[in-house]
Image: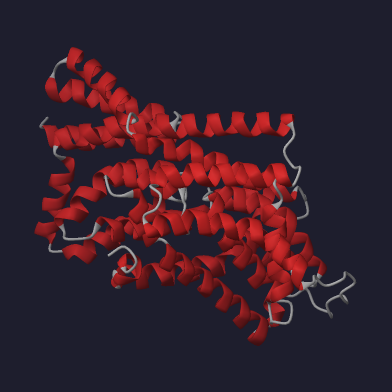
Amino acid sequence: MDDVSLGFALIGAMVALIVIGLPIGISLISTGAAGVWLIRDNPDLAFRFTALATYSGIQDYIFATIPLFVLMGLLVSVSNVGRDTFEVAAALLARLRGGLGIATVGANAVFAAVTGVSIASAAVFTKVAVPEMVRHGYSMRFAAGTVAGSSILGMLIPPSLLMIVYGVLAEVSIGAMFIAGVIPGLIIALGFAGMIWGYATFAPGRIMQGGPPPAASERPLTGGEMAAKSVPILVLVALILGGLYTGLFTPTEAGAVGAAGALAIALARRQLGWRKLWRVLKETGLVSASILFLLVAAGLYSRMLSMAGVPQAIGNAVEHLGLGPYGFLLCFVLIVLLMGMILDSTSILLIMVPIGAPIATAMGFDLIHFGIVTIIAVEMGLLTPPFGISVFTVKATLGDPRVGIETIFAGALPFIAVMGAALVAIALVPWLSTALVR
């Protein structure tokens, strides 16, 4: 068997290991090491190659970005900043048709610019927004679907853990990825808001339970209260994105500044006792260690694929088939969407980016543009059955046996359609993802 055939066989073996339940990191590192052994017919080289990948895979200063942004996101989550952001958005949009739904999208967009984790957004806004929307006459399907759908903004609007992972795997600037995500994130957020307004205006029966909404019993927020609730998150957003866009901070420094700011907010609000602090630090360590291990495994897997010549072989096959650059991109996106039905976002990037990025470069794609398209496709997987981790997060956080998982999936379908339209537009118009970077 030649090296290329062996490489494809090892990809199949790796997928089979994942399907039978072996953790993704173990699957990647074991097939990577086995591939080096078989390609070079030297077990000693395979072990030394694995040790080198383990050491060099995460020694760079940029990898400090991961625990810092994880810490910042967790500190923001325990500070009730998400609740305050929703309350302000709801007050500002109360007179607009579909205002609470649009407020959920807007609050999620702002919250995403701090946390960078879709699951955190889904958990926070399920507790905050769903009960309020249902109380005001929205159907549970629409309320839960809106939270699940808009939670994906957490991985697109910077900072984003997926962008960090992609930047490491594709060897592109993480700061550039962050900046490139701003316009696509806003396009999708505005698309969600427009879709909700359209339903509320032309087909209110699709989103309301029927009957008039209850009269507002609570006192409306004053301008001073809205300002007080908005200042913490707006300061964090300005620090992180402003520092990155102006070049004042590197991504790692932005993570440190953001984590320090989130800590100050949590302490100022008296939301962080010793027990909570310990839980936040422990969860930060667990999440960061798991991501870093996956990156080590993906580094070895990527080097094995290059050694076997798999990316070059796929690129040559695409060229000979006459698919062209956008034919390749279409096939790549379809594979990512299919994988999103059974795997989580990080796992898809770890498997697909080492294969796709070299081919995309050879096809003439800007890797920043290619990365944004890939991340949007990956994020759609968070809403598609049977995996749909954002949907399952909403279901688990609701804790209501009367709300079936199929109800939340149905509510998220319009958001998938909006994301699909945005994906096509951004794929065909690279400027939408690269305008702020150049």
Left or right of residue 412: residue 99: right
Look at 49% across and 41% down and name the residue there: 256
Tell me if residue 305 can be seen.
yes
Residue sticking out furthest to the front: 248
Q: Is residue 252 above or below residue 233?
A: above
The C terminus, quarter of image: bottom left
Relative to 368, 142 lies left or right: right
Q: Quadrant of the N terminus?
A: top left
Q: Between residue 99 and residue 322, name the one nearer to us.
A: 99
Give percent across and percent down for residue 327.
Answer: 22, 64
Residue 291 is left or right of residue 212, and the answer is: left
Residue at position x 38%, y 59% in the image: 246
Indicate whether 325 appears above or below 351: below
Residue 36 picture location, percent across and down: 20, 24
> Seen in the image, is 402 located left or right of residue 108?
right
Q: Is residue 374 visible?
A: no
Up-down relation of residue 258 to residue 5 (above or below) = below
Q: Nearer the viewer, residue 386 or 319?
A: 319
Q: Quadrant of residue 207?
A: bottom right
The type of colouring in the image is secondary structure
Front residue (pair 396, 70): 70
> Where in the figure is residue 237, as x and y percent of width and height?
54, 58
Name the outermost residue toward the right.
217
